[in-house]
């Protein structure tokens, strides 16, 4: 079977239990995956199973103080291992590269669907970008990566933590608690709340996204051969290759939940462009920037070049400081 093509020979009348977080965004993107799988695999039905994660329960403190983004995948992976769900859908940027909170030796990322817009989005009722805000304006983000890049451009802004789901963050913005907030464009689009009258995708020349941002990861048990084959109908080779390059930067930097590391790989024809930005440990500038281009069949050389450049700028040392 060609990966990404409809599977015309699935097990008949099979129901797969899809584990998902209960947030609006998680349910929206899991629902999209469910519909796509059912359309590609006649006879297969997908049932959503809502699972509350630690990341959803901790809403008033920084995640990095409690285990990082892995708190959004921990309970889903535990449910997979326990057999209470057949597969899970994660935002790939939430899947830990290092120090996973669950032993995932028996789990596998079976498919990476085509990527949504990987950029960050500037949401504000007062400005179209960070350039338009007055000195001392308050910008909300829970991301050290975003914080470091905003302060790189505008050290005179107040970049303060914000937690909660998309609706909560946008409500806090409307109430005037912040002059702007930064969110993932993919989340706004998948959640059906993208409003271009006051939400603007940030050009990647100004802010590079998190590794894997905009991509989804479909995870199941290693030994679930039928499930793996069905999920394979969703796989996009180019997206998976780009995300792997981005995550390799984090892996080689030994990044953790504290690490303000950005990376974005894009393929144009037979060439891949890999860009990265790395801030200081607490999201403080200066920011190290690096980029490299290589043939797709030699993509690993782009990682080597980017890492060499980042190392010359002392990126690893600043992550540990």
Image (cartoon, rainbow, N blue to C red):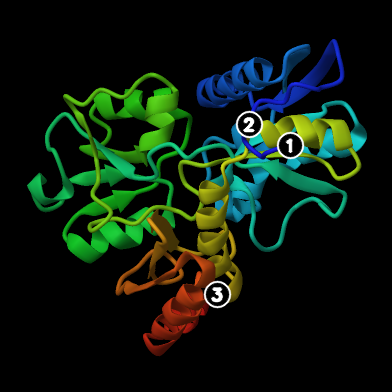
Residue 233's x, y, as percent? 67, 32
Q: Nearer the observer, disc 2 or disc 3?
A: 2
> Can you identify the residue that label 1 sits on?
1
Disc 2 crowd rating (10 Å Cα; few below 14, some 14-19, many 20+) is some
Position above or below: 50 against 219: above
Among the 4 quarters of the image, the one containing residue 40: top right
Residue at screen point 39% across, 46% down: 161
The residue closer to the viewer here, 204 or 228, is 228
Position above or below: 105 against 213: below
* Residue at disc 3, secondary structure: helix
In the picture, which quadrant includes the N terminus? top right
Among the 4 quarters of the image, the one containing residue 30: top right
Query: As drawn, is 135 to the left or to the right of 104?
Result: left
| Label located before the other in sequence (2 or 3) | 2
Position above or below: 306 against 262: below
Disc on res. 5: 2
The residue closer to the viewer here, 82 or 308, is 308
| Label located before the other in sequence (1 or 3) | 1
Per the model, the C-alpha gap separating discs 1 and 3 is 37 Å
Residue 259's x, y, as percent? 50, 64
Per the model, the C-alpha gap separating discs 1 and 2 is 7 Å
Position above or below: 126 against 38: below
Given contact means CB atoms under 8 Å apart, are the residues at marks 1 and 3 in contact?
no
Residue 312's x, y, as percent? 39, 89
Residue 175's x, y, as percent? 26, 23
User: How many badges with numbers are in the image?
Assistant: 3
Residue at screen point 28% across, 54% down: 204
Q: Is residue 289 visible?
A: yes
* Residue at disc 1, secondary structure: loop
Residue at screen point 24% across, 65% down: 152
> Can you identify the residue that label 3 sits on?
253
């Amino acid at each position: 079977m060609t990966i990404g093509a409809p599977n015309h020979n699935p097990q008949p009348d099979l129901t797969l239990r899809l584990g998902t977080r209960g947030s609006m965004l998680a349910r929206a993107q899991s629902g999209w995956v469910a519909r796509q799988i059912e359309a590609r695999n006649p006879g297969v039905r997908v049932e959503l199973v809502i699972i509350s994660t630690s990341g959803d329960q901790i809403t008033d403190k920084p995640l990095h103080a409690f285990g990082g983004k892995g708190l959004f995948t921990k309970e889903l992976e535990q449910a997979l291992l326990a057999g209470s769900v057949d597969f899970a859908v994660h935002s790939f940027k939430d899947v830990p590269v290092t120090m996973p909170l669950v032993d995932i030796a028996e789990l596998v990322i079976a498919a990476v669907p085509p990527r949504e817009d990987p950029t960050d989005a500037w949401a504000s009722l007062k400005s179209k970008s960070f350039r338009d805000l007055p000195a001392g304006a308050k910008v909300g983000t829970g991301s050290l990566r975003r914080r470091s890049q905003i302060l790189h451009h505008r050290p005179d802004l107040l970049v303060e933590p914000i937690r909660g789901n998309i609706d909560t963050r946008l409500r806090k913005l409307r109430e005037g608690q912040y002059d702007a907030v930064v969110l993932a464009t993919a989340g706004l689009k998948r959640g059906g709340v993208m409003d271009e009258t006051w939400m603007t995708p940030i050009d990647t020349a100004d802010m590079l996204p998190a590794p894997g941002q905009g991509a989804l990861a479909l995870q199941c048990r290693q030994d679930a051969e039928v499930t793996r084959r069905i999920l394979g109908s969703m796989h996009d080779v180019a997206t998976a290759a780009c995300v792997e390059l981005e995550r390799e930067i984090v892996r080689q930097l030994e990044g953790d939940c504290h690490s303000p590391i950005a990376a974005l790989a894009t393929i144009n024809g037979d060439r891949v462009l890999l860009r990265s930005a790395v801030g200081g440990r607490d999201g403080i500038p200066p920011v190290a920037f690096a980029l490299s281009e290589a043939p797709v069949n030699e993509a690993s050389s782009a990682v080597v070049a980017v890492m060499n450049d980042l190392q010359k700028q002392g990126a690893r040392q600043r992550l540990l400081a």
